Amino acid sequence: MIEYFSSHLWQFWTLVGFICLILELTSGDFFIMCFSIGAFVTAIASTFVPSFTVQIIIFAVASLLCLLFVRPLALKYLHRKGEDRPSNVDAMIGRKGVVTDAIPADGYGRVKIDGDSWKACGENDQPIAKDAHVEVVSMASTIITVRAL
């Protein structure tokens, strides 16, 4: 059995590569993916290099080079919007929805946005009829302020 694995080390390195790819799915910072790339490079090299010690060195060098050169490019390309990406309340501003319960003047109604129902009031306390299309202009706690489109 050991003879089989020693003569088919490419399978071991391929397995290590896939395990690292699966682990990368949990982190998303492209750190573990560099080890995966190193393992796949070593799997290819193992068909030409029978020594396990040399394969370990190839794995270490390939992973280190990937960490130094590939990871920064991947982070720059895939996280290029980084801080500019709106979230939470900021992501709600500008969203469009449909009034499901009419919004009376100085009162509250309901607006459906992407399948979620929100308590809403009209901008400047304006009434908005049922089934009107609206846009979110602000949000305070869980109450959105909308204007008719």
Image (tube, rainbow, N blue to C red):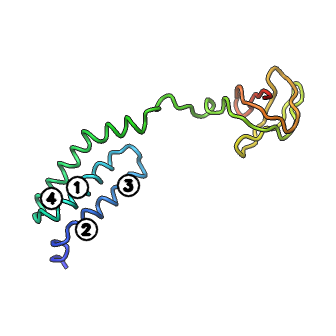
Mark 4: secondary structure: helix
Q: Position of residue 37 (x, y in %)?
A: 28, 52
Mark 1 closeness class: few <14, some 14–19, many ≥20 residues within 10 Å: many
In the picture of the structure, the residue carrying the numbered disc 1 is 41
User: In this picture, is 48 found above or below 125?
Assistant: below
| Quarter of the image that includes the N terminus | bottom left
The CA span between labels 2 and 3 is 18 Å
| Residue at position x 29%, y 61% in the image | 16
Residue furthest top as drawn: 124
Left or right, 119 with reference to 81: right
The CA span between labels 1 and 4 is 10 Å
Mark 3 closeness class: few <14, some 14–19, many ≥20 residues within 10 Å: some
| Residue at position x 37%, y 34% in the image | 76
N-terminal of the pair, mark 2 or mark 3, is 2
Q: Position of residue 82 (x, y in %)?
A: 46, 32
Residues marked 2 and 4 touching at CB (< 8 Å): no
| Quarter of the image that includes the C terminus | top right
The residue type indicated by label 1 comes to Val
| Residue at position x 88%, y 27% in the image | 127
Residues marked 2 and 3 touching at CB (< 8 Å): no
In the rendered structure, find residue 11 and report the number of the disc placed on it: 2
| Residue at position x 41%, y 46% in the image | 28
Residues marked 2 and 1 touching at CB (< 8 Å): no
N-terminal of the pair, mark 3 or mark 1, is 3
The residue type indicated by label 2 comes to Gln
In the picture of the structure, the residue carrying the numbered disc 3 is 23
In the picture of the structure, the residue carrying the numbered disc 4 is 55
Which of 12 and 77 lies nearest the eye of the viewer?
A: 77
User: In this picture, is 84 found above or below 72?
Assistant: above
Mark 3: secondary structure: helix
N-terminal of the pair, mark 3 or mark 4, is 3
The residue type indicated by label 3 comes to Leu
